[in-house]
């Protein structure tokens, strides 16, 4: 057996053994490999047994039907590869959806799910990604009432289908031989990074599609000696979709240097370069223009990218919540190794083969291999320098797209050293890939197992304090969502113990309040405001506690501090509610009016404003705001309030019309019936009042309605019908004394 075969087999055997023993190692030393330990033991045994059998079957099929497979692929390639790729991508989409991620503990899923209104906070890292997701949200919410998480899931699965379609349709760019193409396809499709397409709520599914397009179109460009126009455009899309892909700049630069070297002897290369630069820059320019139109700050965009803590320090000079290890520390090396083990364990083979056979590799220049080596190196340098503030095992997805250049580099390296992989090697590769991929998907497809892993790794000492706090806060959010407030409270306190930020203090205060710890809640909310005097939610929640305790003046004093700092409709709404409770209706009306000025579509503020003016006896002003509100809304409540105002202005005919319109708009709205009938009685329109009461009785079989109907009938001297209504009243409410007395009097008169 040749040395290169021994190296490949030993590497694969080492990785398989490492995978098996990783679950028994203490702590999270091999978090990139040990996730199978969070699955039930019986399932681990089933998966391992199935993997051994499936790998054997794949090798047997590949050997027995080798010639048939080659003929089918050769037949499909020129004639029907589009439909074959489409069918394969649809099948993959079904798998992605069926085994989709059930919890969002990986990455920032829960944070994104919570940021429906403030999704722009993610704009500075991935502008185009956010714009695409928000565009799909508007479309899918209008068509199917999708929320933000459902939109991200749909985009993730759809991106995965496009990703698989590109791989299959351009399979010839994956290698020189059919075996290289198929094995490379299998390795990519079973990498952990493919989890990005299993309904994963994060910002890396779209950029992965652009990235694989960039890599394959670049290989095609090198093979055909064509100008790298398409790679330039896709590189630009990658960068503006997620700025981490700027690490591919050396790769696109290599393509252009190579192409200029080819054409410079025959023609001017300047027009080609300018066109390539234009295609690379165009996506960024267009997105930045959209950001300007939307009112986003480009200066903040620049500041976010150029922040000093984006890079790991050479040494840790002082304690920081964002850094837990330095650039050249063993911990950093271990974390980076775990990331590569997770997303592309097979890279170990490519790395060792390159070390051993670098002279042979460089003896004959292969520009496709060289391009992939530069692309991989650029990403590896980025991974080495970048500060994973959230903790590498938690923020794994930031580097997940790196798997694709690493895999392509590895497979090209293997097939440059040897023309074919033998059966033993292919069997071990298949076993390793399936042992790694299946538990990874299974773990995240089951809420219970994913939760178990998250609760374990959140204590990882290799994480920064910020990373641990964020992880604990995600667990807090999860338990709060499922209604386990006690558990949520514990995780909220633990988050504060790592980073006592205003947000974590606020969460602690809210949960303390829900558990009835009022003093503690007020204390933590007060501390949150001390940390961040601009924390609107803390003002609102704290004032809400005071409101429920009847401390309206204290609530107003607190809200007044917030009002001075910033004009916010929710602040004014809360101030209006508190003034209302104090009986200061004009002051309350002022604040509700301010809400309507800031948010004309805030329906409840319009209603509250009208009610306050009505209570204050300012009927003309109330009518004015009724008319203003009717420009935006047409509801039963609004028309009912308008009728009340008109009635007090003694414009009775108009009031009656509005009462009737309110009934038409909402036949199940009780008050308009009673008020309309009462107004008719006061104007001696007893028959009309009876008709209204009977119309109401068709929907509301209430004792009170029967009694009121009886009273109206008595005014018409229809005593027998009045007796029937009083009897029904007492049947429904035997304790209705007025009805009882009146019925006795009527029956007595009837006997006389």
Image (cartoon, rainbow, N blue to C red):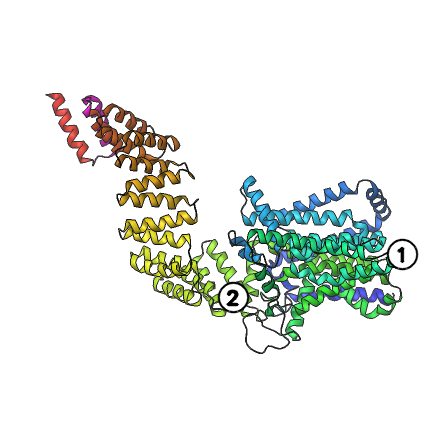
- State the residue in front, 46 or 147: 147
Q: Does the magenta stretch include residue 728?
A: yes
Q: Pick out the residue farthest to the left.
A: 752
Which quarter of the figure has residue 142? top right
Judged from the image, the secondary structure of the residue bearing numbered disc 1 is: loop
* SS for callout 2: helix
Q: Is residue 307 left or right of residue 641?
A: right
How far is disc 2 from disc 1 in space, using C-alphas?
61 Å
Place of residue 280 in the rendered image (x, y in percent of width and height, measured from the top left): 72, 55
Task: Please report the residue visible at 25 percent of the width from the left and 32 percent of the height from the top.
Answer: 678
Q: Count the numbered circles shown.
A: 2
- Which stretch is magenta? 714-734
Circle 2 packing at 10 Å, graded few (<14), some (14-19), many (20+), is: many
Of residues 567 and 670, which is closer to you in this image?
A: 567
Residue 444 image offset from top left, x and y in percent: 60, 55
- Please give left or right for residue 268 compared with residue 628 in the image: right
Instruction: Tell me where residue 503 appears, x and y as whole percent.
Output: 47, 63
Q: Is residue 515 visible?
A: no
**Residue 266 shows which numbered tag?**
1
Q: Could you tell me which quadrant the C terminus lies in? A: top left
Q: Residue at x 41, y 36 (%)?
A: 634
**Which residue is label 2 attached to?**
469
Front residue of 409 and 515: 409
């Amino acid at each position: 057996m040749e040395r290169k075969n021994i190296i490949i087999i030993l590497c694969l055997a080492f990785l398989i053994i490492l995978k098996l023993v990783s679950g028994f190692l203490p702590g999270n030393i091999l978090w990139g490999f040990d996730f199978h330990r969070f699955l039930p033991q019986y399932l681990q045994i089933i998966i391992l047994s199935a993997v051994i059998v499936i790998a054997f079957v794949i090798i047997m099929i590949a050997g027995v039907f080798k010639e048939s497979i080659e003929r089918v692929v050769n037949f499909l390639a020129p004639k029907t590869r589009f439909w074959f790729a489409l069918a394969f991508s649809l099948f993959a989409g079904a798998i992605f959806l069926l085994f989709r991620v059930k919890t969002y503990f990986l990455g920032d899923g829960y944070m994104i799910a919570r940021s429906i209104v403030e999704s722009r906070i993610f704009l500075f890292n991935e502008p185009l990604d956010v714009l695409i997701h928000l565009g799909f949200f508007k479309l899918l919410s209008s068509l199917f009432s999708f929320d933000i998480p459902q939109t991200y899931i749909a985009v993730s699965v759809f991106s995965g289908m496009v990703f698989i379609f590109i791989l299959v349709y351009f399979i010839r760019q994956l290698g020189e031989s059919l075996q290289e193409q198929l094995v490379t396809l299998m390795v990519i499709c079973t990498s952990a990074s493919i989890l990005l397409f299993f309904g994963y709520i994060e910002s890396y599914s779209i950029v992965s599609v652009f990235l694989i397009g960039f890599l394959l179109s670049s290989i095609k460009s090198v093979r055909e000696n064509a100008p790298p126009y398409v790679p330039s455009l896709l590189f630009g899309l990658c960068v503006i979709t997620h700025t981490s892909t700027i690490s591919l700049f050396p790769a696109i630069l290599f393509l252009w240097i190579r192409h200029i070297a080819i054409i410079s002897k025959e023609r001017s290369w300047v027009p080609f370069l300018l066109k390539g630069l234009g295609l690379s820059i165009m996506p960024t320019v267009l997105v930045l223009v959209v950001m300007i139109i939307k009112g986003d700050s480009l200066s903040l965009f620049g500041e976010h990218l150029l922040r000093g803590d984006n890079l790991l320090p050479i040494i840790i000079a002082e304690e920081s919540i964002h850094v837990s290890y330095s650039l050249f520390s063993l911990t950093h090396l271990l974390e980076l190794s775990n990331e590569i083990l997770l997303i592309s364990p097979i890279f170990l083979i490519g790395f060792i083969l390159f070390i051993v056979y670098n002279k042979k590799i460089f003896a004959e220049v292969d520009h496709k291999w060289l391009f992939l080596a530069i692309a991989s190196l650029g990403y590896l340098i980025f991974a080495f320098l970048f500060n994973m503030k959230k903790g590498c095992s938690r923020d794994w997805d930031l580097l997940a797209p790196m798997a694709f250049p690493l895999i392509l580099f590895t497979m090209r390296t293997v097939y440059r050293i040897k023309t074919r992989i033998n059966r033993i090697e292919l069997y071990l590769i298949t076993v390793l890939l399936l042992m790694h991929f299946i538990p990874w998907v299974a773990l995240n497809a089951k809420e219970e197992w994913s939760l178990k892993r998250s609760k374990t790794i959140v204590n990882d000492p290799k994480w920064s304090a910020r990373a641990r706090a964020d992880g604990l806060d995600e667990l807090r959010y999860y338990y709060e969502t499922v209604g386990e407030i006690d558990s949520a409270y514990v995780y909220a306190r633990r988050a504060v113990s790592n980073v006592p930020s205003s947000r974590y203090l606020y969460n602690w205060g809210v949960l303390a309040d829900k558990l009835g710890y009022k003093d503690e809640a007020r204390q933590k909310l007060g501390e949150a405001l001390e940390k961040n005097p601009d924390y609107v939610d803390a003002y609102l929640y704290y004032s809400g506690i005071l409101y429920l305790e009847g401390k309206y003046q204290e609530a107003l004093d607190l809200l007044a501090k917030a009002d001075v700092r910033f004009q916010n409709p929710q602040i004014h709404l809360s101030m209006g509610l508190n003034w209302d409770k104090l009986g200061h209706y004009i002051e309350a009306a002022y604040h509700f009016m301010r809400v309507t000025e800031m948010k004309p579509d805030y329906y409840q503020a319009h209603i509250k404003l009208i009610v306050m003016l009505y209570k204050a006896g300012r009927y003309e002003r109330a009518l004015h705001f009724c008319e203003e509100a009717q420009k935006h809304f047409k509801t039963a409540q609004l028309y009912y309030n308008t009728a009340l105002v008109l009635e007090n202005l003694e414009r009775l005919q108009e009031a009656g019309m509005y009462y009737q319109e309110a009934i038409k708009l909402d036949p199940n709205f009780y008050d308009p019936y009673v008020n309309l009938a009462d107004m008719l009685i006061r104007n001696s329109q007893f028959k009309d009042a009876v008709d209204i009461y009977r119309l109401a009785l068709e929907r509301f079989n209430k004792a009170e309605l029967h009694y009121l109907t009886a009273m109206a009938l008595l005014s018409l001297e229809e005593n027998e019908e009045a007796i029937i209504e009083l009897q029904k009243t007492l049947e429904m409410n035997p304790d209705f004394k007025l009805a009882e007395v009146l019925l006795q009097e009527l029956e007595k008169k009837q006997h006389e």
